[in-house]
Amino acid sequence: MTLQEYRDVAKLTVEQLCTKLDTPRGTVLGWLYGTRLPSSANIRAIQVATGGAVRFDDWAPLEAPPGG
């Protein structure tokens, strides 16, 4: 499940999600819109904060990079 899907299912505002993740709004918006990727430590924190709904594997790229 993506972080955006989790936010939709949990019916959280962006501000509520920021509070839950203890993360600044700009950072969370980047994660939600796919313009930023969280660090490994943040991914683990997101997994804990979402009760396992958003997992490490959910952040894996959908396509292999060119030449990969």
Image (cartoon, rainbow, N blue to C red):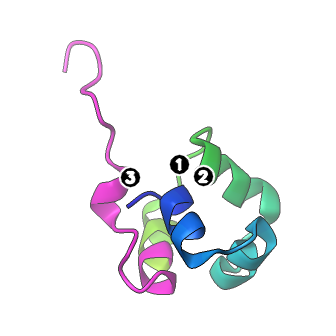
Residue 37 x, y percent position in the rendering: 53, 48
Quarter of the image for the C terminus: give it. top left
Q: Is residue 61 above or below residue 30?
A: above
Say if mark 1 contacts mark 3, CB within 8 Å.
yes
Name the residue at 32% across, 47% down.
60
The residue nearer to you, when weighing 63 against 1, is 1
Q: Which residue is mark 1?
A: 37
Please report the bounds of the magenta region as a residue range: 46-68
Q: Is label 2 in a helix, a strand or a loop? A: helix
| Of pointers 1 and 3, the one earlier in the residue sequence | 1
Say if mark 2 contacts mark 1, CB within 8 Å.
yes
Q: Which residue is mark 2?
A: 31
| Of pointers 2 and 3, the one earlier in the residue sequence | 2
Q: Is residue 10 above or below residue 54?
A: below
Quarter holding residue 40: bottom left
Residue 39 x, y percent position in the rendering: 50, 59
